Amino acid sequence: MRTRHLFLAIGLAAVWGFNFVVMEAGLRHFPPLLYVALRFTLAAFPAVLFVGGPRVPWRWVLTAGATLGVTQYSLLLLGMRAGMPAGLTSLVVQVQAVFTVILAVVLLRERITTRRIAGMGIAFAGLALIALDLGDGGPIGAFVLVVGAALGWGAGNITVRKASPPDSLRFMVWLSAVSAVPMLGLSLLVEGVPRLEFSTEGTLSVLYVALISTLGGFGVWGFLLKRYDASVVAPYSLLVPVFGMSSAALFTGEPVSPVKLAAAALIISGVLFAGTRPASRTASAGTTPRQSPEPGPPDPSGSHREASTRA
């Protein structure tokens, strides 16, 4: 990867990591379901009027909206509102990569290898360590909601894999459009008619997650995938919880305990181990191996595409 593209990938991980701190700030001003609805509304309109059709069957757009949009972000924001800190949330939600592997085996009949099983076991050990660290009186219910969001994200990744969108940004705009309407309805049903009061922090939070994290982020993600294999680009998403936890510690004072660091090491190494292939014998003999088309962990704020479907 060229140096400027390397910094672009790292910068994108920083944007997506800081996104969790921004969402935590937004939840001080909006109910969680309404916040999700506003995010998708701003990400979809007016962009949907200019990008053209999604270029994939509508059943995949709707299914992705239901999983990646409604399910993932509803549970994620509800979990954060219920007490999950921003930095810890950015880490826990990375187990979506493990859920993606499990669902791919069950639904797509993909082959499961010993390496993947070992990687999933390592990642789940990190998840169990977090659950034990929360202990009695901790936000266990909020933790379960975030794990549920990761499961919804994994289901969405399978949907995107089947859809194989040729343009990730265009697909994300339409995913946002089909998610905005049900989220508005769900917000009215559960949270009631909102009492909106203008605040600079709340407004900037929604604008950040909609325009910078969602549209800008997926624009950069698609740009990188057009130039490099997904197996080269996707591992940079493992930097997201690093930036998420560090920015939460810096801006919100969220403590980073040794237990959290150990859990982070387990989850990130497990996801990386499960999502990559060992070097071939030719590599050990001094021959450069061909890049594996098997993708690494999906990105942390939406959809993921296989290397074979990149634009």
Image: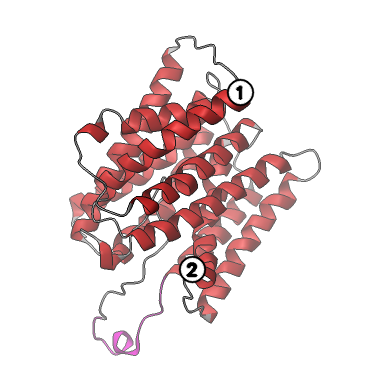
User: Label 2 vs label 1: CA separation?
Assistant: 35 Å
Which image quarter holds the C terminus?
bottom left
Residue 167 in percent (x, y) is at 24, 51
Q: Is residue 16 visible?
A: yes
Indicate left or right for 35 with 13 as reference: right
Segment colored magenta: 276-288
Figure disc tally: 2
Which residue type does callout 1 highlight? Glu
Disc 2 is placed on an element classified as helix
Q: Where is mark 2, residue-wise? A: 104
Mark positioned earlier in the residue sequence (2 or 1)? 2
Q: Residue at x 55, y 21 (%)?
A: 28
Indicate left or right for 310 with 200 as reference: left
Q: Where is mark 1, residue-wise? A: 191
Q: Residue at x 72, y 43 (%)?
A: 140
Looking at this rendering, what residue extends furthest in the right direction? 136
Please tell me which residue lies in front, 88 or 253: 88
